[in-house]
Image (tube, rainbow, N blue to C red):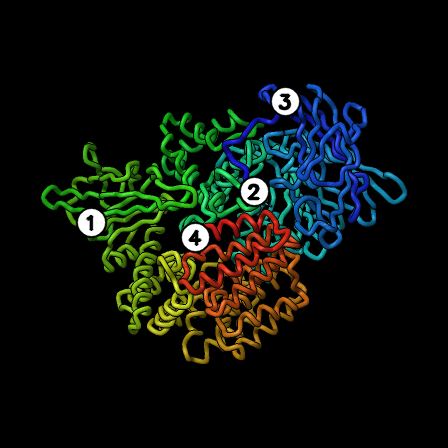
Amino acid sequence: QIKYRQDYLPPAYLVDKVDLTFDVLDDTQTRVRSRMVIHRNPQSTAANVLQLDGSATLLSVVLDGDQLQPGAYQQHADGLAIPDVPDSFILDIETEIDPVANTSLNGLYGSSGNLYTQCEPEGFRKITYYPDRPDVMAKFSTTIIADKQKYPVLLSNGNKVGEGQADKKRHWVKWVDPYRKPAYLFALVAGKLVALKDSYTTVSGRQVALEIWTVAADQDKVAFAMGAVKRSMQWDETRFGLEYDLDIYMIVAVGDFNMGAMENKGLNIFNTSAVLARQDTATDADFERVEAIIGHEYFHNWTGNRVTCRDWFQLSLKEGLTVFRDQEFSADLHSRPVKRIEDVKKLRQLQFPEDAGPTAHAIRPDSYIEMNNFYTMTVYEKGSEVVRMYHTLLGEEGFQKGMKLYFQRHDGQAVTCDDFRAAMADANGVDLEQFARWYSQAGTPLLQVRGEYDAVARSYTLHVKQSCPDTPGQSGKQPYHIPLAVGLLGRDGQDLPLQLAGELAPGAGTRVLHVRAAEQSFTFVNIGELPVPSLLRGFSAPVRLQFDWRDDELSFLMANDSDAFARWEAGQAYAERLLKALLADHAAGRTLQLPAGFVEALRAVLKDHAADPAFKALMLSLPSEADILEMVDVADPGHIHTVREFVLNGLAQALRGEWHEAYNLNQTQRYQPADGGRRSLKNLALAMLTRLSDAWPLEAAEKQCLEADNMTDQMGAMLALRDRDVAERENCYLSFASRWQGDALVMDKFFSLVASSQLPGVLEHVKAAMQHPAFTLKNPNKARALLGSFGRNMLHFHAADGSGYAFLADQVLALDAINPQVASRIVSLFNRRQKLEAQRQALMTRELERILAKDGLSKDVYEIVSKNLAA
Ligand code: ARG
Ligand code: ZN
């Protein structure tokens, strides 16, 4: 049951209009009537058989008023086929569903007594029978009839056009969405909810009602999200010239949700974790994430809804582009360098491993078993990097020209990644043929660069070699078109003006080189001194870079590069070199030593009082354990942990005075949102200081844990104490858990700390946490917080006796029966199996085989595990 991109065929029938009636909507028995106005697609040459996707209980099928007998159509596992249909007709279908029994949170489902939907990508078919594919775009109306006491609020897409009393107990509401849309953008919400209301006037004067709906208990945590909605609307107008197109924009927050949020037309549904934010319950990072996701879903209204995907292989068309847009939104509103570094960290930590592992796929995949498995870091984050490369190649003006042409050509259509690329190329008159390989080839390209200075010719040449590793099903990759942003630093630390051989005059200090060949050289002239090259500025392409800098050149770049990203990157490269050397020393049984040059480079960062504290905190953070795993071919997770801890402890000791000073200087008085950078540096300093034998940092952390007026500082203290003695952290941890036992999102933070600790006995702590009254496997946030964090725990998940693997495999099996999408995400934590030394690999293999042998395994988990074992 593999689906292939090459098999795409246009739909044989199109739906002009669909009127849905939920009569009656209820928790265990909901009846759905659907009336579709259907006509034959002139583009299709297929036989006159109507194919409908569906899995709900089918009650009746009526074609142009005639009830069809079961012999007049074929029902199969995935839907319905009706042969010999006319060219134009009306089809009425009635189904029945049980939302509360639907623990997959896909389709119509219950959560705390209310009802919600999630239809992307293929959830609509669980509600009714329909051509559930994004290239079928129809005008929807939704009438909902429900008990007024149980479901006082009834929401759907578009504008509310009527409401009234249906009978003594029931009321009805009718919604009409004037825009054509695919079924995946359908949404319905019903229940006891309250709204924060506001409004926004668009640049052309449209008055838009804004509503954020939550359960009553959460209403005091949505003010920030409302501000973020307005900022998103304003930003999309000014930066992209895009305006909102309905009279109402609603957001609903729900505690049980598989992903972050969903861009249903006019009615976005969000995981509570992506909406709720108040200083005492949300960290600075949470606020940042909420604003970014609000932006993301709002931006989808144009990039996703007005122009959507032809088929699901094109998912990155809307996701890569919309992630790029949300990243730019955050960068424009806050620190651009800090945002860029955070995004690259995330890409490296989560996408690079995916691209190097058993499920590696191009941003536009060629095949899938379960589409839900392709909402990946590759499609989203690498997809965004690919969109960013157009921007780097074309500049802001050229990029916006391309966007304009894209909307001119495709508004109201379902299109492909090639259509987007064509708009960018045509609007700018450039050739982007070779660039297409970014869409078809998986794997992270490697750039090996060498510098050559000719003092006599006063020239400096960069020799660039590109390659890309084989990935499952793909070998022998073709060269990519790579924008490589470079600069050359002189002895004084300033950028030298850059002039390529053959150019008449020197230009700016940063140049974007177009790397197209497997091997290519670029010669800069009028270079009067041996420069230090700064490469891949701003992370101009999603590649790995190798260049043989000397240690002192790296600390020189850390201190002087005009590109803030490159300064951070130089520090990471320095740390990488050091960590790799230490891993080799450790494996060979040599004593570990922390080189003075590295310590001094970081001391200089700490002592730079002019620098942005948020940027400093990033400069002072080592590559994560997951990053280190990717730096080596075969790893012993225990060694990775030991070596990284050695460096951290050494830095804590060697820079103790500087950490102490940073801790003191970055204390803030009352909580101010804008002090986030200072909080992050202060809390990093605190975490380093608690590594020392001194008593005062532990006391300071405990005091901060108990008394802080904001969650960032509370969590900072919790993290600083996480790996100390159980006795030392106990006061703080117990009081935190009891204080926040009623707050689901804060308890998620607690569970993730428990599961990510390095203390002995963490597996037992995790098992105990599963018995906590606030924990349930049915809630995706809980499962991710506890099991997801445990699966990323280098020390304990990878315990040499295999206990971590066995435990997680058990949980995957339990979860698969409840919610396959979540189970599939958790089982992906086994995907670095091939990186591990032989014994752990064997232990993992055994668990994966045990999972695969289970009867009735979901497609979701089957796809991940079978690919893992096949690699
Ligand atoms: N389109 C949503 C977003 O990016 C994600 C929905 C994915 N849902 C899923 N069940 N796979 O904002
Ligand atoms: Zn999205």
Cα separation, mark 3 vs mark 1, equals: 68 Å
- Under circle 4, the secondary element is helix
First reached walking from the N terminus: tag 4 or tag 2: 4
Type of the residue with mark 4: Pro
Instruction: Relative to 254, say whether 501 is above or below.
Output: above
Cα separation, mark 4 vs mark 2, equals: 20 Å
Residue located 74% across and 50% down the image: 100
* Residue 108 spot, x, y in % from top left: 70, 45
Cα separation, mark 4 vs mark 1, equals: 34 Å
Cα separation, mark 3 vs mark 2, equals: 26 Å
- Under circle 2, the secondary element is helix
The residue closer to the viewer here, 766 or 854, is 854
Query: Contact, CB < 8 Å: mark 4 with mark 3?
Result: no
Mark 3 against mark 2, which lies toward the viewer?
A: 3
In the displayed structure image, the side of residue 827 where residue 449 appears, left or right: left
First reached walking from the N terminus: tag 1 or tag 2: 2
Q: Which residue is mark 4?
A: 353
Q: Which residue is mark 3?
A: 47
Residue 230: assigned label: none
- Under circle 1, the secondary element is loop
Type of the residue with mark 3: Ala
In the displayed structure image, the side of residue 274 where residue 388 appears, left or right: left
Q: Which residue is mark 1?
A: 531
Q: Which residue is mark 2?
A: 371
Cα separation, mark 4 vs mark 3, equals: 44 Å
Cα separation, mark 1 vs mark 2, equals: 49 Å
Q: Is residue 278 visible to us here?
A: no
First reached walking from the N terminus: tag 3 or tag 1: 3
